[in-house]
Amino acid sequence: MLESIFGKKIDFNELRKDFTILNRTINEKPIIYFDNACMSLRPKQVLKVMNEYYNKFPGCAGRSNHTISEEVNKAVNEAREQIAKFFSAKAEAVVFTKNCTEAINLVANAFPFENGDVVLITDKEHNSNLIPWLKLQKEWKIKLDVIASGPKNEFSVDNLISKLNEHKGKVKLVSVVFTSNLDGVTNPVKDIIRICHKHKVKVLLDCAQAALHHEINVKKLEADFIAVSAHKILGPNGVGALISTKENLDLLKQFMVGGETVTDSSYENYEVEKIPEKFEAGLQNYPGIIGFGEAVKYLEKITIKNIQKQIIKLNEIATAGLSEISGVEILGPKKADKRGGIISFVIKGKPIHEVSLLLNNTHNVMVRSGAHCVHSWFNNDKNRESMFKDGTVRASFSFYNTEEEVNEFIKAVKEISEL
């Protein structure tokens, strides 16, 4: 058991009762859900508040003045405040989006770039933090450059500084992943932000993978923009946020416009709403936003610190077990605590999708196989001929997973390796 922020002991086995999906069996065997890097499960508390919206006050926020609308307004505002508190930001600087991908696209399309400006990314970015910049480059609006990893596939501060110096004041934004969904490695974001700010460069952090097991404090980090998805942190699908400061959001142009993004309009012109509403076009995903707020409230009770300890403990067991299996190679650092809740691996001579299907079909162990939306890394010259060239099998853990599940996973991988 671990200590919570309220001084109570956290029993992770007890918390499993909040996730009714974990009671499901297939072929009379319990499911083992190890695809948390793709999507987390939702506790019943989140589902409850979303159902309350549909059953008790299924109206619009910010448009009407009747009782139901006011109740929606109140619930959405409270959720915004809760999310702002969780990330140590101000409520006015929380912009609701469809997901992390849309939050990154918002910055890409709204940042005041000029022709010739440079954006830097790492060589391990999810497509959501690569394609928006490639699209801008194709439109001749920016130049995209990549910060190469170091010899151990780690983020290289030296290479960042070299790129900043190479482009001599042209770099306007560095957009980097906080924690990689490929191998679970966390980048030195504090150092990245400090160096970039020294060069008067803004920083956007893709926090989709990090938010569940890293404290993300906008004030302490001095982050300019962070992008998150609710579905990675116990929240519903279809909602995320761009979290920033008023000063940084004021730099952005409107990306999508329409209802609720203006205070008035004529056939000739319109008056823009204040932030954050100026970026939230049309009816929002109200039940999703309310569920998002409840999800971070749930996380606050457990604390990110406790979640991180539990996830690393599970990964240490998995890493020790898989390391003893002949033919298994793990992507990334050998030490589990350097990979958070992710273990990406291959079994020599076994196609990755076949391994994934066998884990599912024979042991109900649900993982992901493939390039994990980081195709560019696998297509890199240095990786194209490696044992990981076809992708990996990725198991990813959360606090509601158990040591027994991890041991069953190890047993299953060993059986498959011997086929």
Image (cartoon, helix red, strand yellow):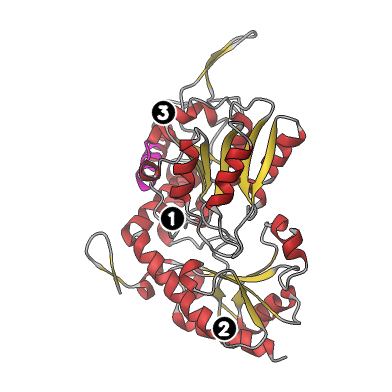
Q: Does the magenta stretch include residue 386?
A: no
Q: Disc 2 marks which amino acid?
A: Ser
Q: Distance between the residues labelled 3 and 2?
A: 61 Å
Q: Which residues, given as a range, are shown in magenta?
A: 77-90
Q: In the rendered view, does 389 fall on the left or right side of 295?
A: right
Q: Disc 3 marks which amino acid?
A: His
Residue 264 rendering spot, x and y as whole percentages = 53, 14
Q: In which quarter of the image is residue 166?
A: top right
**From what the image shows, is residue 341 above or below residue 139?**
below
Query: Depth-wise, is mark 1 or mark 2 nearer the camera?
Result: 2
- Tell me the crowding category of disc 3: few under 14, some 14 to 19, or many 20 or more residues within 10 angstroms, Cα based: few
Q: Distance between the residues labelled 3 and 1?
A: 26 Å
Query: Depth-wise, is mark 3 or mark 2 nearer the camera?
Result: 2
- The residue that mark 2 highlights is 323
> Considering depth in this image, is 290 or 117 the residue closer to the camera?
117
SS of the residue at dot 2? helix
Q: Which label sits on residue 415?
A: none
The answer to the question of whether label 3 and label 1 lie on touching residues, with beta carbons closer than 8 A, is no
- Tell me the crowding category of disc 2: few under 14, some 14 to 19, or many 20 or more residues within 10 angstroms, Cα based: some
Q: Disc 1 marks which amino acid?
A: Val
In this view, which residue lies farthest toward the left? 7
Residue 222 rendering spot, x and y as whole percentages = 40, 40
Seen at 39% across and 40% down, the residue is 75
Let me know if residue 103 appears in the view.
no
Q: Which label sits on residue 66?
A: 3
**From what the image shows, is residue 169 above or below residue 309?**
above
Q: Quadrant of residue 376?
A: bottom right
Seen at 68% across and 70% down, the residue is 392
Seen at 73% across and 38% down, the residue is 135
Q: Which label sits on residue 46?
A: 1
Predominant secondary structure, magenta span: helix
